[in-house]
Amino acid sequence: MSDHIRIAVALEGAGWHPAAWREDDAAPTRLTTPGYWRDLVREAEQADVEFVTIEDSFLLQGSAPAGAERDVVRGRIDALLIASSVAPHTTRIGLVPTVTTIHTEPFHVATSLQTLDHTSRGRAGWRAQVSARPGENDLFGRREQPDLTGIEPAALAGSAFVRDLFDETADVIEVVRLLWDSWEDDTVIRDLATGRYIDRDRIHDPDFEGRFFSVRGASIVPRPPQGQLPVTVLAHATVPYELAARQADLVYVTPHDDVSAASILAEVRSAEERIGRSSAPLEVYADLLVLVEDTAEDARAALDRLDDRAGTPLTSDALVLATTVDDLVARIRAWHDLGYAGFRLRPARLPADLRRISRELLPALQAAGLRTPEASTASILRDRLGLAPAPNRYAIERKEVVA
Amino acid sequence: MTAKRQIHLAAHIPGVNNTTVWSAPDAGSQIDFDSFEHFAANAERGLFDYLFLAEGLRLREHKGLIHDLDVVGRPNTVAVLTAIAAITEHIGLVGTLSATFNEPYELARQLASLDHLSNGRAGWNVVTSSNAFTGANFRRGGFLDHADRYTRASEFVTTAKELWKSWASDAVVADKETGRFLAPGSIDRVEHHGPQFDVVGYFDVPASPQRHPVIVQAGDSADGRAFAAEHAEVVFSRHSEFAEAKAFYDDVKGRLAGWGRDEDSLKILPGATFVIGDTAEDAREKARETSLGQVSPQTAIAFVEQIWGKDLSTYDPDGPLPDIEPAVDVTLSRGRVRHDDPAAVAAVWRAKAEAEKLSIRELVIQLSGRHSFVGTAGQIAEQIDHYVQERATDGFVIVGATNPHGLDDFVAKVIPELQERGSYRTSYPEGATLRENLELPPVRAGSTSLVRETAAL
């Protein structure tokens, strides 16, 4: 087991608590400005956080009419573009935007992430997300929304409809990976004698034909620094575990206690076995929604105050921890011992809980011997995550033919 | 004495075609961010209105293989412009984005995000295509009839504007006391139903500083010009010869009144190349060098092959045009703009080559490697100023021959001459949006077409 526990921070609006934007130090009117995101990511970078993820969705948050009291943050800007804006102002931290798979064009998804890898000089990753919430189809007018009323959540999770969404997402990731490999590293040759700018034999069309879509030609973007960007997926159930096992490098899971922490890890490993994963095992990160104060009582009181303002107690797919740094260190150590490579922390309040993470939690983890500063010097995201370099599949074939 | 008309300049990020000389000693990477950083910083030093980035969504092919003689490879448009926005302060960022291979909701969202992240400096060059070759890279494939290109583009822009205008500019109140995030009644549910798009729901990006990006258009057909008169705020024209430029300017600006628009609500900027010398003679020599770099022997043959529709690799680029006739209905090149009737084009080329005694390469240099402005910095400034003062253009999209240094000399030498003449700004207006840099009128509230609600027939 590695002695360096990796920490990611999940950035979302004013924080993950619906009332976080009403905190004194929250900046709810700056959420669409570049400075807001730059400040947050720099804060995380200075603390050696491995990477940030940035949430996204096509749907407007909330359900109340405009002007309602006790409302949530409304409106956002594109996560990949937030990452693109932050890239030139950071140097070591990974930038992992959410880019959805169902209403987007796989070709644009591939090229925009490749471009982020170029502009960040090798620090881009992708959180691939299925996007099929009611209402999204209507924003695009291209898909029929099946009638799902009356279907139990458990039945829905295993339904053909849901399986198709995940199969389509697997195809999207597959074609994106083909596009990322469509240029070999040394394609640009600038050969004056023959007048050729490229060696076109080193460009490979994906020629992908699947059940849901086809993509013929190579990427328009030359191979980026990392070649293959780290692909990450949030998963809560068997179908998404299998998607992660088939296509991802890293999976975020949501255990709620020690028992589920162990059983979910086992489920992920058995999903890997079932689909016959041949690449390196998934890096498994546990998601935790954290609110940190000096004492447990203060943390509890802060959460109560936020819940009061929201009018309803906080619920989340991830375990909510309103607690102290020491308690978090203990939790992280215990789950790391179970086999978790890292943790994705969702700050309840921004910037307050991000500052607690960067200024108190990370130094405490290092003091406890759970993180080493040497592991944080690399400026390529794959290196920061401990992922092996990803050689181009066509270059490998070429070498095998030569050998 | 009346003030001089002010010149508007855009800086064309070196493109994926043979204008960009990759063989030059100082030619850098087409894709490393360093190149974009240098290019943008220089253009901002030169007080340009905006950077312009072209787009091509499939690698071009020639004779069934990827065309390998020109620069190949480019970034994703919105992603790179947003990164450039982060390292610049004043210059506009105009990206070419297809109305065929995107969906209005997603693209409107990206452009609104760029406008936020650049603090009001976003522009969109709307292009449209029926090209099935490029379409094969996308979910829907090459589905659009040629005749429907502008129908779709127009409805696309109209739909995007409906989304952009669905948030009041002061919608976000974020009152921490009451928990009211939005002002009552400040966002509208969009309900668009049309032949091309059905978009229903709430847009999720708050109103951006410009309300919507500056709309740029480049097509030259009758449909393209009609689209420009309805929607465009800038036209990137291909007419840089004075008489043609003047005729185009008069035609397009003449259409504006029909849409209730005045002359200054649309800027016309032809693309222009240039070669600067210490003397006129020096400039001519440099121009010759640049042309030879742009039209290599192999490029000359490939250029002629596009028209002939046949493999001509056995012909001598320094010899005469082939004596054989062009093939009918053969397309050797894919992923680029189609030429007119090959036989007619070939006849015109032959006549020109014979009259001027031109080899294949010399002919291609004449046809494709001509430079708009060749001279000393003072001479070039004088010509640019002449076009603008005489209302043949509002300025130019300046195209350099190398990446990323192609506009360095222009900024260092021509810009001061323009400033000297009193027809070019000496600093950016503080905090100006792209629309303000271009001296365009602000977006009118409540209107999706610039003028009327219904789409053009």
Image (tube, coloured by chain):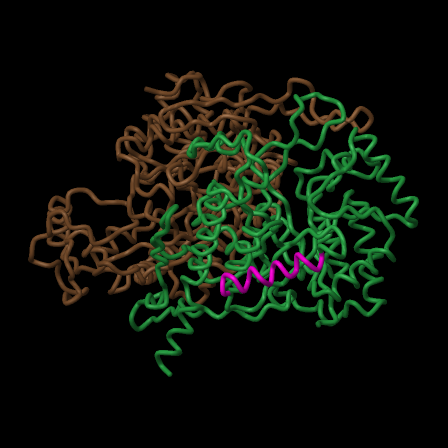
Chain colours: A green, B brown
* Quarter assignment of residue B456: top left
Decide if residue A172 is on the left or right side of residue A308: left
Magenta stretch encompasses residue A284: no
Picture residue at 71% right of the left edge, 42% below the top: A316
What is the span of residues highlighted in magenta in the rendered image?
A261-276
Q: How many marks?
A: 0
Decide if residue B24 is on the left or right side of residue B187: left
* Quarter assignment of residue B69: bottom left
Decide if residue B401 is on the left or right side of residue B288: right
x and y percentages locating residue B8 in the rendered image: 48, 37
Picture residue at 45% right of the left edge, 18% below the top: B451
Magenta: predominant secondary structure element? helix
Quadrant in which the C terminus of chain B is drawn: top left
* Quarter assignment of residue A358: bottom right
Decide if residue B200 is on the left or right side of residue A46: left
Q: Between residues B273 and A154, which one lies in front from this camera angle?
A: A154
Q: Between residues A58 and B402, which one lies in front from this camera angle?
A: A58
Magenta stretch encompasses residue A273: yes
x and y percentages locating residue A78 in the rendered image: 58, 41
x and y percentages locating residue B355 in the rendered image: 12, 51
Say whether residue B420 is visible. Answer: no
Say whether residue B206 is visible. Answer: yes
Q: Between residues A347 and B20, which one lies in front from this camera angle?
A: A347
Q: Between residues A341 and B210, which one lies in front from this camera angle?
A: A341
Image: A287 above or below A92: above
Image: A38 above or below B432: below
x and y percentages locating residue A139 in the rendered image: 50, 31
**Residue farthest to the bottom, as pictured:** A403
Picture residue at 18% right of the left edge, 59% below the top: B360
